[in-house]
Amino acid sequence: MEVFRLARSKFATILSGKGAAFHGARWNSVGVELIYTASNRSLAMAEVAVHLTIATLPQDYMMVTILIPDDIAIKKFPLNKLPANWNVFPHHPKTQVIGDQFVADNKFCILQIPSAVTQGDYNLLINPLHPDFKRISIIAKEKFPFDKRIFK
């Protein structure tokens, strides 16, 4: 399976959950490493675009294509188990518990969770501490200029 990640060029060459661990995010607390990916390119763009304005739009984004071997098991988090208001901004602290527990359990390398930005689409979180992580690889990187009409 191919998944996608939109990243600044200096972060596009290596898969690491260190950035997410440094800042924390919707699905992980500070100190917990996770790699956020999207099931398609449009979702990867939308997940980044919601945090930007035309004034803060960097010009060095890269679309990173990541290959997850088909035999790596994916844990699908059930929608009916999500806390109320899981998709609000700023994110609900209970969503971080879900990702933190996923990493701590270390039973799966991939967690499929719904996108808070695009209803009906899914993000795939990669646990870089899982033994199967070494089998996941970047297979393509290409410049990704944002269409400025998105920010009008």
Image (spheres, rainbow, N blue to C red):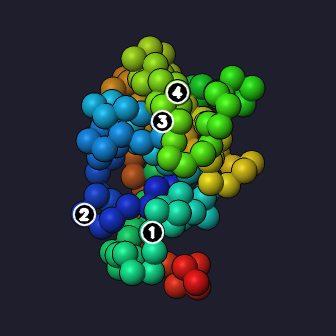
Q: Looking at the picture, does residue 16 appear above or below residue 93? A: below
Residue at the image position 65 percent from the left and 37 percent from the top:
85
Q: Earlier in the sequence, mark 4 or mark 3?
A: 3
Going by the numbered disc 3, the residue's amino acid type is: Trp
Q: Tell me the distance, in whole angstroms, between the alpha carbons under discs 2 and 1.
A: 18 Å
Q: Earlier in the sequence, mark 2 or mark 1?
A: 2
- SS label for mark 4: helix
User: Of residues 59 and 2, which is closer to you in this image?
Assistant: 59
Q: Tell me the distance, in whole angstroms, between the alpha carbons under discs 4 and 1.
A: 25 Å
Q: Looking at the picture, does residue 131 appear above or below residue 110? A: above
Going by the numbered disc 4, the residue's amino acid type is: Lys
Q: Tell me the distance, in whole angstroms, between the alpha carbons under discs 3 and 2.
A: 23 Å
Going by the numbered disc 1, the residue's amino acid type is: Leu
Q: List x then y, in percent, for residue 76.
A: 65, 28
Residue at the image position 52 percent from the left and 85 percent from the top:
148
Q: List x then y, in percent, for residue 113.
A: 61, 36
Q: Which residue was labeled with disc 2?
A: 10
Q: Residues within 10 Å of mark 2 (few under 14, many from 20)?
A: few
Q: List x then y, in percent, for residue 96.
A: 46, 30
Q: Which residue was labeled with disc 3?
A: 27
Mark seen at residue 94: 4
Q: Tell me the distance, in whole angstroms, between the alpha carbons under discs 1 and 3.
A: 20 Å
- SS label for mark 3: loop
Going by the numbered disc 2, the residue's amino acid type is: Lys
Q: Tell me the distance, in whole angstroms, between the alpha carbons under discs 4 and 3.
A: 9 Å
- SS label for mark 2: helix
Q: Residues within 10 Å of mark 1 (few under 14, many from 20)?
A: few
Q: Which residue was labeled with disc 1?
A: 52
Q: Earlier in the sequence, mark 2 or mark 4?
A: 2
